[in-house]
Each structure stands twice: as C-alpha cells, then as structure tokens.
Amino acid sequence: MSGSPLHTRIWHEQAEPDNPFATRVARCHGYDVYGQMLGKARWADMVWLLLKGDAPTPAEAAMLDALAVALANPGPRDPMVHAAMCGGVGGSPGAASLMAALAVGAGQSGGARDVNLCMRHWAQCAEAPSPTWPEILTQTGQPRWLAPDDAGWPAIEHPAGFDPHGVRTAGIVRQTLSTLACMSTGPRLPWLTAHLEALQQLAGLPLAMTGVAAAALSDLGFTAQQGEMLFLLLRLPGAAAHALEQASYGFKRFPYPKVELLDDPLHKPQKATP
C-alpha cells in the first residue's frame, strides 16, 4: 500500500499478498495472536498483553480473571446498568445502550473516575510511609496533582473508593476484598484488609467496590488511566445482559422504583359535579 504506515508499538500486521486490506498475520507486542495465542491464551492474557506489553504470570492472570468476575455485573441497582436497561427497554440499538452505560459509569461517584482517583491516591502511598496511608486514602477536596485529563472534573466530594450513600460495607465488597487479598502479591489489598475498620472510621464511609477494584488494579501494576479503562470494560457484560433482558420484557415490566408523590392527583378528593 502507498502512503505512510500506521505507527503503533502494540500491533503489527502482515497483509495477504493478494489483498492489502486483509490481514494474514497479526502480532501483539511480538506474539502471533492467531498462530500462537488463539486457543491457548485466556482473555485476561490478551487484555494484559495489550495494555502492558508483556505476558502476565499465571497468578496475575488468575487475579485479573477473578476481578473480572466480581465486576462483570454491578446489577440493576447500579446507575450504569440502569442506563443500559433504559436504552434496551426504549428500543435503542445495542451500541446506544452500551454508550449510555459507559457515560453513566464513567463518573466520580461509584464510577470509573472514582477508581482513577483512588489509584492515584495509592500511587501517593507508594512514596509515603505506611502510617500516613489512611490520611492519603481518605483525602477530599482539590487533588494535589493536576493533569490535562483533570480539566472539567469537580473537586473530590468524598474519599475516592468509598460509598457516599452507604451505611456499612456491602457483603459482596467484603467477599471480593477477602478473595483478591488472598491472591494478591502486592501490598495494597492485604493492607486494606488488615486496616479496613480503622480506615472506614476515618473516612466516615464504608468501602465501595471501586475501592477494592482500585487496590487490586494497583497491586497488578496498572496505571490509574489503565485502571479507569479496565473498570469500564469489565462492567459492560452485565450492562449488556440487562439491556437485552429489558428489551425482551417491554416497558410495562421495567423495574421502576416506587415514587410517592406529595400531591398525587389520584388521591385528591373529587369535586362534586353540579
């Protein structure tokens, strides 16, 4: 083909000899994807290779797989999944339902931005003595670091990785933390398990799934930007499944939350007609 070649460290392709638009061999960071990896590598291996440029160890791949299971379906209570359900029941194309889920799930309260912020706090912890970790992890207000991708985001209203509406740590959050802490070779998840109660008392809030995910992704060596992307990606299966389910049910079976109107016309006394 004429013109400049594509420049990427991630992917290298060789075209078919009789069709420059068809790929004969594709390599990801040097690995022959269809000749060496297909049928042998796991999904976690491929994602790890794409983002980090090398193959994960069996322990790293197993932990990423476990995290993927924990995040796969946040459930219909989650705003991200609910947005996809609205798209499905409204007859939107699949792409529109997933884009709605991504838009809602990208936020700073329980979304991917929350994971990004929490992972940056963990990065600060790596440069500080462990007695100061609780103060770093529960900080709010304007971040100490500012980057181009921070433009437009409001100040942190609650400690990243904690549930601003929670009363106590949810059962699934505790189970995920316990499982991943046993699998992690990094310092964050075991420390978080050992200091959870004191940390929650300092934050005044219970730990959220975003906090567990941020610690796990940090222990796996991902950057905050990579973790933000992965968190969005790993939660899409549940959004897709619930959108498809609601599309088949129709709007009459959509699980709307019950709303109590203060001035419900249905319960107003009827005026007598002359």
Image (tube, rainbow, N blue to C red):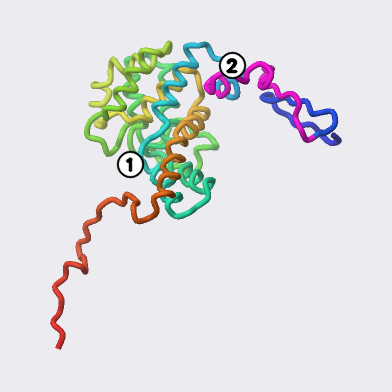
Note whether residue 123 is visible: no
- Quarter holding residue 139: top left
Residue 273 spot, x, y in % from top left: 16, 85
Describe residue 104's horizontal placement relative to residue 164 as left or right: right
Taking the spot 51% from the left edge, 22% from the top edge, the residue there is: 222
Residue 73 or 167: which is nearer the viewer?
A: 73
Q: Which quadrant would the C terminus be assigned to in this image? A: bottom left
Residue 225 spot, x, y in % from top left: 52, 30
Residue 238 or 179: which is nearer the viewer?
A: 238
* SS assignment at label 2: loop
Amino acid type at circle 1 is Arg
Instruction: Assess disc 2: are there few (<14), some (14-19) or many (≥20) residues with their C-alpha within 10 Å of its C-alpha.
Output: few
Q: Which mark's residue is nearer the viewer, 1 or 2? A: 2
As drawn, the label of residue 261 is none
The residue indicated by pointer 2 is 40
Answer above or below: position of 17 versus 129.
below
* SS assignment at label 1: loop
Q: CA distance from mark 1 to mark 2?
A: 36 Å
Describe residue 180's horizontal placement relative to residue 150 as left or right: left
Describe residue 1's horizontal placement relative to residue 115 as left or right: right
Magenta residues span 21-47
Taking the spot 38% from the left edge, 55% from the top edge, the residue there is: 251
Answer above or below: position of 125 versus 243.
above
The residue indicated by pointer 1 is 77
Residue 92 spot, x, y in % from top left: 50, 52
